Amino acid sequence: MAFNKLAGALAGKKSGLKSRPPDLGVNIANSTLFTNASTKRRGSGSRDDAPAAAAAPEQKSDEEVLDEYVSTLYSAYRPEKLSYTQRTKEELLAEIGAWLRPGYDAAIAARSRATKSYQAELDADAISRGMGASTYVTDMKYRQQRAEAEDLQALETDYAAALARQLSDALNTEQERALEVAAFNAENENAAYLKAYDMALTMFQAYKARQGAGGGATVRRSSGGGSSARTTSAENCEAFLAGLSGRERREVYSASSPSGANYRAELIASVGSRGYVELMKKYPADNRI
């Protein structure tokens, strides 16, 4: 995925997220865009409520904090829903009739031609015999017309039955497709929620551990990479996220690549769990498929 101008300046060139060095702090601190930025290892004095670009979050209950984590993470992980518009009965009838009706019309026309041809032969034979418009000829023509009418009615009946069968099958297919799309969306959303809830629990446990340690506990490992994470200023973190595209933020927030996992770990280490959640709200990911 391509970076915009700010992200390109940070990396020194336009490149994909995965090609960038897996160390957010170093990238930002060494950039000329942040002359006042400094990179440091998180020490014993670091706190989970490190200042983010937004105002410090208000005091909330544990339940509210966890719910906020889950909600924000779910918004980042939740994929865009697929949609399927079922065709209406009228649309299907028009579509089916467009390819089904011509065959029956051709059969009806052929049957009518057969009647006219038979009647013409009767007239020619009667004239050759000197019979003229005899009662026999008239009766035979009437019988042929009645037979034609019966055959045409049979063709129309067969057409109506075929049309009904095709329409029923098409409506069932439309319903099945709609159900498949709904099931796909539900499965994806459930997977995204479980992923968000698992990550939220990890962040919440770190948040509570730091509270229990009086704010001085250190968490130096990312949830995905297992490596120690550098820290940088909240302003640098915000500028970094602002310079990414929505899809690149999604890669960071969901840790869908090793680099994304490292970036996410460093963001959390730099601004704390709650600060990270606030940044996710301010700089949402693009969840379109």
Image (spheres, rainbow, N blue to C red):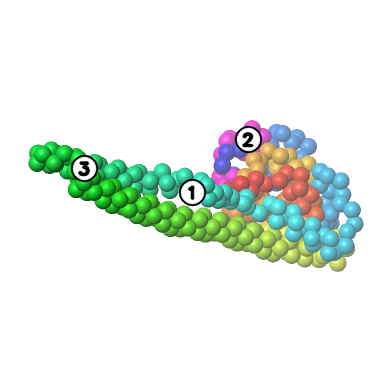
Q: Which mark is residue 4?
A: 2
Instruction: Say whether residue 270 is visible.
Output: no
Amino acid marked by disc 1: Leu
Measured Cα–Cα span from mark 3 to mark 2: 82 Å
Residue at image point 72% right, 34% down: 33
Residue 14 shown in magenta: yes
Residue at image point 72% right, 50% down: 267
- The residue indicated by pointer 1 is 92
Q: Tell me where residue 45 appears, x and y as whole percent.
A: 84, 56
Q: Tell me where residue 200 appears, x and y as whole percent.
A: 73, 61
Measured Cα–Cα span from mark 1 to mark 2: 46 Å
Q: Nearer the viewer, mark 1 or mark 2?
A: 1
Q: Nearer the viewer, mark 3 or mark 2?
A: 3
- Pick whichever of labels 3 and 2 is earlier in the sequence: 2
Q: Which residues are the magenta region?
A: 4-19
- The residue indicated by pointer 3 is 119
